[in-house]
Image (cartoon, coloured by chain):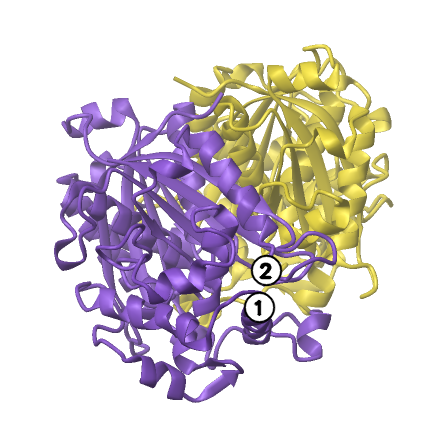
Chain colours: A yellow, B purple
Amino acid sequence: MSPAPAHVAGAGMVRFGKYPAEVTLESMALGAARAALADAGAGLGSVDGLYVGHVFGGPVAGQRIAAQLGLDGRPVSNHENYCASGATAVREAWVALAAGLHDVVLVIGVEKMTDRVAGGVRPDPGDLDAAVGYVMAAGHAMSARRYLADHEATREQIAAVAVKNHAHSVHNPWAQYRKPISLDQVLGARPIAEPLGLLDCSPISDGAAAVLLCNPAGLRRLGIAPTGPRVRGVGLVSGSVQTGLGDINAEDVSRRAGKEAWRLSGVEPGEIDLVEMHDCFTIAEIVRMEGLGLVPHGRGAAWAAEGMTALGGRLPVNPSGGLLSRGHPVGATGVAQVCELTWQLRGTAGGRQVDGARTALAYCKGGTVNGTDGGSVTTVVMTA
Amino acid sequence: MSPAPAHVAGAGMVRFGKYPAEVTLESMALGAARAALADAGAGLGSVDGLYVGHVFGGPVAGQRIAAQLGLDGRPVSNHENYCASGATAVREAWVALAAGLHDVVLVIGVEKMTDRVAGGVRPDPGDLDAAVGYVMAAGHAMSARRYLADHEATREQIAAVAVKNHAHSVHNPWAQYRKPISLDQVLGARPIAEPLGLLDCSPISDGAAAVLLCNPAGLRRLGIAPTGPRVRGVGLVSGSVQTGLGDINAEDVSRRAGKEAWRLSGVEPGEIDLVEMHDCFTIAEIVRMEGLGLVPHGRGAAWAAEGMTALGGRLPVNPSGGLLSRGHPVGATGVAQVCELTWQLRGTAGGRQVDGARTALAYCKGGTVNGTDGGSVTTVVMTA
């Protein structure tokens, strides 16, 4: 038995970016929450509970947000799964609606990184991989090198992911970056972990996103017709990227996360019209799409370069601009992806609209990149 | 509609206490998890997902635990609601079972405080109350002073809570403290925030607790009869302790949490045979029991002194020793309470058994004590 779908009654964001200290975590969350409520035409009084995804907000951040929002008293829970925290909050909310615990819930993903994680996310002191230099960027650089060695792929093709995603977010008012970048800019950017340069990496960002989810009883309460985008299922898996000592790009965790997505949603991979993919690094978008089985093995870089994953292409990936260009306030990302899918499935995404989008997938990866522990992947499947 | 009850197939703990650095958060969680699985006679292969409550374990602590436990790959989520984190994880697990997302789930509450929170939990830098000295202990001291002024109660009666709870945990092999203490010891202890002294305050602790929960399909998978303790419902509320500018001891949050407990469980307050109560301070046990409506207003201190809330009394509170004597590793406490209720409802609690226990309540409070934000209270109702 799979829990029943949840309707997305409203979606809202504050623009991702870098904000000064006086723009607090709470104020960003409030902005997104109010936008989602306004989008649904719903008042605060209709909200049964609050699910908050964040990593660095400190204890009971969700309760601070609830109090300032005017939801004092309501059930509030905080959900942490690193960069998949927001999507994990969506998952718990979906389940609560299906179980009948609540009928209308507000899900907020939020992060203030520029204050809290100055200079970037630091590895845990006990992380032995990181202690010898195997940090996130190094892991993805190894992934890129292995990819180039194993397939008929080029550095330029990998860089094409950044060019594509920045081109998409020109049309996204919520994106941190809204200027197109050239292939030469990506190739000539400051090296981070070769072959990856600065523009192959997602930025440090602040931001918040929110969705109002409901079950059929909630729809009736809100006076909303049972049409429009629905969360059909949210997969969650953990564990190693690769299998055993095999290929660093085997993406076993993505394969398993995809399987959960199709099992829980009843949707077939071939039905997916667009993907919001966790492109924390250019190469990550490529190997994860392949791991899901949505792009043929070894062809992801070529697909990016050929426009197959661009707007107007065969399977658009990250019409929002993705983490690379919309930005990546870690706890907010999973909810922002659900906002983007909602707008795409409604057909209201403006200049970045995927024509005829009916079925979509959002993917988040939290925790270590290639280690044997600490990872989590979420897969949200939505239909129009 | 209230989600269906969850069966407790197994419960296990590691003894609460202060452990050296080499006893890691992960190793404590593993000890509790293995004890819960052994108690259920269940193998790791039967576990569908892992719900982990902690506050200070750092990002994706649950995934690190899962990997070391041998549950790599399974869905893992981390839940934070300060001192109610463990109970919040129980809540999300209960809901997931009711929704049919999972059939058998492992819930772990864990905290390593002696390493991570040396010297005690510090208030958030933005906490204006704390900046002027209104920290946890000060708030509870004010609560005690107000209680003494408002009711025919004495300092000795408040101290009786500590004497009682330490007497109980003489019989609890999982408790941090297992020696009885005298009234004179409580009254003569080093002052912390007058009238409260050291023995009126719960200690800094390390520890872990785990329960294996399942729905009817899970029971069939485990080959367990559908008898034994069940989680009937888990209430969760947030918000202010008092109402408006009224009495600091009005305990509106407890009143509301109790209402949620009865609503979700279908159990009446009069049916409760014993309570595991969040006695972070002696006075807190008193005012929270009153707030729930389980002890008459203004009579809680007298009830403690008269043995009404002791083992053998009218309504035993904290047969385990409570936070004061079992200890309080914050993320672990809510799950440890559910372990204690399980053993009590099975009739296997040995020297601390409440005779004929059929229905029980566990209460956790996380976040600020008297502030207008940041608080959360959970109420777990279980039946035999």
Quarter-wise, where is residue A51 in the image?
Answer: top right
Q: Say which residue label 1 marks.
A: B143
Mark closest to the chain's N terminus, 1 or 2: 1
Q: Position of residue B351 (x, y in %)?
A: 13, 59
Quarter-wise, where is residue A346 in the image?
Answer: top right
User: 10 Å neighbourhood of mark 2: few (<14), some, or many (≥20)?
Assistant: many
Type of the residue with mark 1: Ser
Residue A84 appears in the picture as rendered: no
Which chain is disc 1 placed on? B
- For the point 43% across and 89% down, which residue is it? B190
Q: Secondary structure at mark 1?
A: helix
Q: Say which residue label 2 marks.
A: B249
- Identity of the residue furthest to the front in this view: B152
Q: CA distance from mark 1 to mark 2?
A: 6 Å
Q: Position of residue A383 (x, y in %)?
A: 62, 17
Determine whether B309 is above or below B41 in the image. Answer: below
Q: Position of residue A94 (x, y in %)?
A: 54, 28
Q: How many marks?
A: 2
Type of the residue with mark 2: Asn
- For the point 81% across and 28% down, which residue is it? A39
